[in-house]
Image: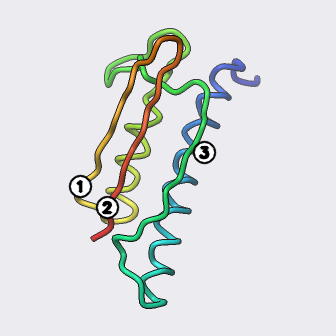
Amino acid sequence: MLPWPHETAACQAAGAALSLVDACLEAAAQAKTCGGSAKDVPAGFGICRPPGHHAVRQSCMGFCLFSTVAIAARYAQQHHGLQKVTSLQSFEHLSIVNAVMVTPA
């Protein structure tokens, strides 16, 4: 049995966020080996639906099954060894912006 469409979308959104973290940090590692600084992390921007902004640790809400930004932040810490990760959320008139910023050591 296939999952509901919103479950598939939520998994794809989280996967896209993890891929974005990987791409940015791999580019930073390449820059460092070429004489640049690891702090010169390329910016990445992902547009994912659902963003997961209503999900909380204990449960989902509506179509927000889990917080895509929180998953990306924890992934950056556990898989890339980052200690500090900043998450930004901006609630605009008809749109919601979720962002995660990572700083390589």
| Label 1 or label 3, whichever comes before in sequence order | 3
| Label 1 or label 2, whichever comes before in sequence order | 1
Q: Position of residue 26 (x, y in %)?
A: 51, 71
Disc count in the image?
3
Calculate the distance from the C-alpha at mark 1 to the C-alpha at mark 3. Answer: 21 Å
- Image quarter in which the N terminus is found: top right
Q: Residue at x 31, y 65 (%)?
A: 81
| Label 3 or label 2, whichever comes before in sequence order | 3
Q: Residue at x 32, y 56 (%)?
A: 77
Q: Residues within 10 Å of mark 1 (few under 14, many from 20)?
A: some
Q: Residues within 10 Å of mark 3 (few under 14, many from 20)?
A: some
State the residue in front, 76 or 42. 42
Location of mark 1 (residue) = 84
Q: Which mark is residue 101?
A: none
Mark 3 is on which residue type? Ala
Q: Position of residue 90 (x, y in %)?
A: 38, 26
Mark 1 is on which residue type? Lys
Location of mark 3 (residue) = 16
Q: Residues within 10 Å of mark 2 (few under 14, many from 20)?
A: some
Q: Residue at x 44, y 32 (%)?
A: 98
Is 77 situated above or below 1?
below
Mark 2 is on which residue type? Thr
25 left or right of 1 in image: left
**Callout 1 secondary element:** loop
Location of mark 2 (residue) = 103
State the residue in front, 76 or 25. 25
Asked whether the beta carbons under mark 1 and mark 2 sit within 8 Å of each other, the answer is: yes
Calculate the distance from the C-alpha at mark 3 to the C-alpha at mark 2. Answer: 19 Å
